Image (cartoon, helix red, strand yellow):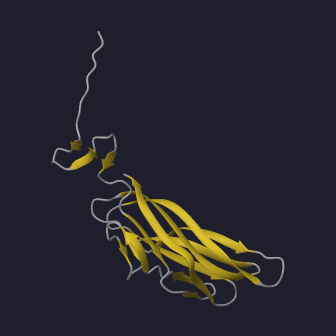
C-alpha cells in the first residue's frame, strides 16, 4: 500500500508563533532571515596612510544597511541581536603605488587583525599606477562582534587611499 497526501499551507511558524517561512500562493517562498543583515559603505574621504602604519579606513558613506548594523561614525559593522551566524565580507580601496610598493587590506574582528591579503606592486619602469587592494572573507560571528577594515602600505612615504571604487560590504549567509 502506498499512501500519499498533500499538505497546503501558506505560513510555517515556530512554537512561539514567529513566522519562519511564507508562500505567496504561487510557489514563491520568503524566509525570515534571508541574507540579513546586509550593508555596503564606501570611503567618505580619502584616507592618509603613513609608511608602515596600519590605518583604519574611513568607510563612512553608507549605500544601504538593512538592519542599521553599520555605524558610519565608528566605521564598523556590529552583529545585531538575533543575527549570529556566518557572514561574508568584502573590502576594497584604491592606492597609487610606485614600483615594488606593498599594501594590504585587513579585516579586524573586535579590535584584532584576523585576516589580510597583500599586494606587491611591481612595474617595469619608474613610475606608478593605481592598484586596487581587495579582500574577502567568511567569518563566524556572535551578537555584538564587530568588523572593521584597515589598510597598510610600505612604500617609503605617505600615500592616500582613494575613494574611487572603494567599498566595505557584507551579509549574513547562514546560521
Residue at the image point whose x is 32% and y is 67% from the top: 67
- Percent position of residue 5, x then y: 26, 22
Q: Is residue 26 toward the left or the right of residue 108 in the image?
A: left
Taking depth in this image into account, of 59 and 145 the one nearest to the observer is: 59
- Percent position of residue 99, x then y: 77, 80
Query: Image height check: is 102 above or below 30?
Result: below
Query: Image height check: is 79 above or below 30?
Result: below
Q: Is residue 122 toward the left or the right of residue 148 in the image?
A: right
Q: Residue furthest left?
A: 16
Residue at the image point whose x is 51% and y is 66% from the top: 90
- Percent position of residue 43, x then y: 50, 80
Residue at the image point whose x is 32% and y is 59% from the top: 83
Query: Image height check: is 18 above or below 27?
Result: below
State which quadrant residue 82 falls in. bottom left
Numbered disc total: 0
Q: Residue furthest front?
A: 26
Q: Residue furthest right?
A: 125
- Percent position of residue 35, x then y: 39, 56
Q: Is residue 77 toward the left or the right of residue 53 in the image?
A: left
State which quadrant residue 170 falls in. bottom left
Q: Dividing the image into 4 quarters, which one contains the N terminus? A: top left
Residue at the image point whose x is 37% and y is 67% from the top: 145
Amino acid at each position: 500500500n502506498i499512501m500519499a497526501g498533500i499538505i497546503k499551507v501558506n505560513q510555517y511558524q515556530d512554537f512561539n508563533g514567529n513566522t519562519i517561512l511564507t508562500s505567496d500562493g504561487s510557489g514563491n517562498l520568503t524566509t525570515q532571515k534571508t541574507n540579513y543583515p546586509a550593508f555596503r559603505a564606501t570611503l567618505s574621504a580619502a584616507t592618509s596612510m603613513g609608511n608602515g602604519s596600519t590605518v583604519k579606513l574611513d568607510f563612512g558613506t553608507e549605500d544601504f544597511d538593512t538592519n542599521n548594523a553599520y555605524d558610519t561614525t565608528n566605521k564598523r559593522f556590529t552583529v545585531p541581536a538575533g543575527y549570529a551566524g556566518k557572514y561574508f565580507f568584502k573590502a576594497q580601496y584604491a592606492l597609487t603605488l610606485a614600483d615594488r610598493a606593498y599594501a594590504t587590506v585587513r579585516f579586524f574582528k573586535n579590535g584584532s587583525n584576523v585576516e589580510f591579503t597583500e599586494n606587491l606592486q611591481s612595474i617595469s619602469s619608474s613610475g606608478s599606477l593605481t592598484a586596487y587592494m581587495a579582500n574577502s572573507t567568511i567569518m563566524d560571528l556572535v551578537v555584538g562582534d564587530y568588523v572593521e577594515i584597515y589598510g597598510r602600505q610600505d612604500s617609503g612615504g605617505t600615500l592616500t587611499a582613494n575613494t574611487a571604487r572603494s567599498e566595505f560590504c557584507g551579509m549574513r549567509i547562514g546560521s
